[in-house]
Image (cartoon, rainbow, N blue to C red):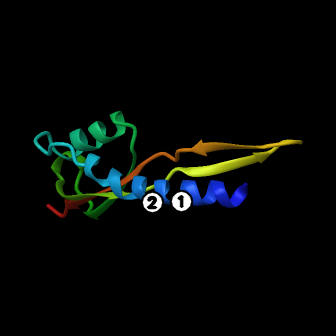
């Protein structure tokens, strides 16, 4: 039974890992703080990589990189059967900023 579950879940998780990267780039019209706020509002865990020490409102965005995450199967063995739940980790993005002004 475990081999069947692994055989069924692995191709699906690989598909989900490669399907997600297109959603992480909001419009950059409002500046760095606006973009970071939009990403957080969409449910992303935002990591910031910056060059320089200028305030955030003076930074320009160099890029937004999505870190693909796959849903992980979480099997629970009961007395007579196996229940498999899916855990979806929080999607992560890195916003690269140029704050060297």
Report the residue at 29% width, 43% height from top.
Answer: 36
Residue 58: x %, y % from top left? 16, 50
Q: Which mark is residue 27?
A: none
Q: Would you place residue 8 above or below residue 52 in this image?
A: above
Residue sitting nearer the eye, 36 or 25 = 25
Report the residue at 33% width, 53% height from top.
Answer: 19
Q: Would you place residue 6 above or below residue 55 in this image?
A: below
Name the residue at the left extreme.
29
Q: Quadrant of the C terminus?
A: bottom left
Report the residue at 34% width, 51% height from top.
Answer: 20
Report the residue at 71% width, 49% height from top.
Answer: 75
Q: How many marks?
A: 2
Name the residue at the right extreme.
79
Quarter holding residue 82: top right
Residue sitting nearer the eye, 33 or 24 = 24
Disc 2 vs disc 1: Cβ atoms closer than 8 Å?
yes
Gap in Å between the C-alphas at discs 2 and 1?
Answer: 6 Å
Quarter holding residue 64: bottom left
> Quick one: SS at disc 2?
helix
Q: Which residue is mark 2?
A: 14
Residue 57: x %, y % from top left? 19, 45
Residue sitting nearer the eye, 35 or 98 = 35
Q: Quadrant of the N terminus?
A: bottom right
Q: Which residue is mark 1?
A: 10
């Amino acid at each position: 039974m475990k081999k069947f579950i692994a055989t069924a879940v692995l191709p699906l998780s690989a598909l989900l890992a490669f399907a997600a990267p297109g959603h992480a780039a909001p419009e950059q019209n409002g500046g760095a703080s606006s973009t970071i706020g939009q990403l957080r509002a969409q449910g992303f865990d935002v990591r910031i990589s910056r060059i320089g020490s200028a305030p955030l409102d003076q930074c320009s965005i160099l890029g937004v990189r999505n870190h693909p995450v796959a849903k992980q199967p979480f099997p629970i063995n009961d007395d007579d059967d196996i229940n498999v739940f899916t855990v979806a980790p929080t999607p992560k993005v890195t916003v690269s900023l140029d704050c060297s002004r």
